[in-house]
């Protein structure tokens, strides 16, 4: 009512569903109904594809892996902003064509923000060149300056594990001398992420799961920032995350308290150890059908 009266933009909005109308991966008209928090699990039958297509329909760049000579992919996403809007996307040879409520558009208006932490982000973190802030920023498609500005929010609202993360300007590491001693520059500095204060653990010394947790902290902080200005969905392709059950349950519990919509993917063999951590989550499985992949609702009570 305030939005109608004052003509102001609203922060209320969510994705209702995605329908894969035509694809070489899925059965015709495969539908995934999205809740506020949605868990999508299964083997490698199209979970990442759904994440990619949702983000592309909402205006993000389509990954290069879809620039293939295959039959066109047709998808339909229903978003409530708060009125229902239907966004139809066609992906053909890497080109995205979009239609909103029956009207073709050249560029998608920013009706809903997307923060997408891709499946390969953790594994590729070390491949990004530059300093720590540049490596993490590249994984999220941000500038290093924007990334550093998220640290105060993480220190206030992040997980208890991530709240002591901070960037420090430190003497640039030059390698080791002939005796194996570390050498540092007297004139150059570099940005270093540490957890635990100025003498804490550096990014490069973290384990694989801990590096993913760092990326998750920044992705959540970015989504919180965007959710203050408009509807936001956080897409987490976590199928290959090296998380044990305790960390995954802690992740679910933390995400359950965030002020934005979440879509999280996990592997086929994952089962929760603490059901309470996933209270309020909708759960689905992608599996192989006779004519392509299918999506079915999966009860939390099911034990495999």
Image (cartoon, rainbow, N blue to C red):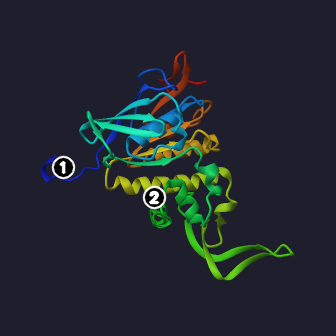
Q: In this rendered view, identify the residue nearer to me: 219 or 259.
A: 219
Say which mark, if any, is on residue 189: none
Residue bearing the label numbered 2: 157
Q: Residue at x 60, y 34 (%)?
A: 267
Question: Which element type, helix, strand or loop, lies under badge 1?
Answer: helix
Q: Which of marks 2 and 1 is in front?
A: 1
Q: In the image as oriented, which residue stretches furthest toward the bottom?
A: 186
x%, y% of residue 5? 12, 50
Q: Is residue 51 above or below residue 109?
A: above
* Residue 166 in the figure: left or right of residue 74: right
Q: Residues within 10 Å of mark 2 (few under 14, many from 20)?
A: some
Residue bearing the label numbered 1: 3
- Res 275 visible: no
x%, y% of residue 243? 63, 44
Q: In this view, does 182 lie above or below 60?
A: below
Instruction: Identify the mark nearer the N-term, 2 or 1.
Output: 1
Q: Which residue is drawn at 61% across and 43% down?
A: 241
Residue 224, by quadrant, is bottom left
Q: Which residue is drawn at 53% across and 21% down?
A: 292
x%, y% of residue 122? 61, 50
Q: Residue at x 49, y 24 (%)?
A: 26
């Amino acid at each position: 009512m305030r939005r109608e009266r004052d003509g102001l933009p609203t922060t209320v909005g969510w994705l209702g569903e995605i329908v894969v109308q035509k694809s070489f991966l899925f059965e015709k008209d495969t539908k995934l109904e999205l809740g506020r928090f949605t868990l999508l699990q299964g083997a490698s039958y199209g979970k990442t594809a759904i994440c990619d297509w949702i983000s592309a329909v909402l205006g993000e760049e389509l990954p290069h892996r879809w620039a293939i000579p295959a039959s066109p992919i047709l998808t339909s996403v229903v978003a409530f902003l708060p009125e229902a809007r239907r966004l139809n996307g066609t992906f053909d040879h890497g080109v995205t064509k979009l239609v909103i409520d029956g009207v073709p558009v050249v560029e998608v208006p920013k009706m809903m923000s997307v923060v997408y932490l891709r499946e390969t982000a953790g594994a590729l973190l070390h491949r990004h060149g530059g300093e720590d802030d540049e490596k993490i920023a590249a994984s999220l498609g941000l500038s290093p300056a924007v990334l550093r500005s998220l640290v105060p929010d993480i220190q206030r609202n992040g997980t208890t594990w991530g709240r002591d993360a901070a960037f420090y300007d430190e003497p640039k590491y030059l390698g080791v001398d002939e005796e194996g001693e570390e050498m540092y520059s007297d004139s150059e500095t570099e940005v270093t992420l540490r957890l635990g204060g100025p003498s804490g653990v550096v990014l490069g010394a973290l384990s694989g799961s801990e590096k993913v947790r760092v990326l998750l902290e920044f992705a959540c902080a970015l989504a919180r920032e965007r959710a203050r200005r408009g509807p936001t969905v956080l897409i987490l392709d976590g199928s290959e995350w090296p998380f044990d059950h305790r960390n995954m349950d802690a992740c679910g519990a933390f995400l359950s308290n965030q002020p934005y919509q979440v879509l999280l993917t996990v592997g086929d063999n994952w089962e929760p150890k603490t059901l309470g951590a996933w209270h309020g989550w909708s759960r689905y499985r992608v599996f192989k059908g006779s004519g392509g992949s299918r999506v079915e609702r999966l009860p939390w009570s099911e034990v495999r």
